[in-house]
Amino acid sequence: MISVDNLAVEFSGTTLFKDVSFVINPTDKIALMGKNGAGKSTMMKIVAGVQNATRGHVRAPKDAVIAYLPQHLLTEDNCTVFEEAAKAFKHVFEMRDEMEKLNKALETRTDYESDEYMSIIEKVSDLGEKYYALEDVNYDAEVEKALKGLGFKQEDFTRQTNEFSGGWRMRIELAKILLQKPDLILLDEPTN
């Protein structure tokens, strides 16, 4: 459950909204509607943790994953559809690369009793614990499944993202969000 308590947002002394409170339960499907400039996007950014409110709080379980799909594209033009979607697992790949780097550093050291050596051992241990606690997932297969589920064909995977229309590029962003398996998905004008 996510609770929003007495949110207020002000820009240069002008109040966008104030005293907004609501609860989002695990099975809720909510549409946020209002006129242009009413603060719908701002509200979603605050719930997603992308922007701060002037006053009030958003409370969510510590381990809750909140995903936010903005109305403007975030895809990069210099990579393939598959590479862009695989960025959903960027944190996993970064962990793996860091572990490899630390292990290589250990291979060349001979100061086994030093504080620095022990510090590297501790980092490898902590990182390894987090890395191996992750589900044993075939990341390539998961990316393929998500992309195909959103209408991409196998031959699209190797095409550059800039070859696609805005709507198709938004699907790539949606694939990245779905691959993260969030507890809450916030879609900002998803039909644009």
Image (cartoon, rainbow, N blue to C red):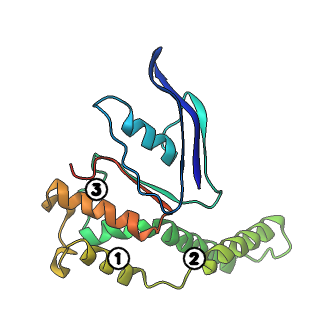
Discs 3/2, front: 3
The kind of residue tagged 3 is Glu
Say if mark 3 contacts mark 1, CB within 8 Å: no
The kind of residue tagged 1 is Val
Q: Residues within 10 Å of mark 1 (few under 14, many from 20)?
A: many
Q: CA distance from mark 3 to mark 2?
A: 27 Å
Q: Front-most of 170 and 183?
A: 183
Q: CA distance from mark 2 to mark 1?
A: 24 Å
Q: Dot 2 corresponds to which residue?
A: 100
Which is nearer the N-term, disc 3 or disc 2? 3
Q: Front-most of 108 and 88?
A: 88
Q: Dot 3 corresponds to which residue?
A: 76
Circle count: 3
Discs 3/1, front: 1
- Residue ID at (25%, 57%): 170
Left or right, 167 with reference to 27: left
Q: Dot 1 corresponds to which residue?
A: 143
Discs 2/1, front: 1
Q: Front-most of 114 and 17?
A: 17
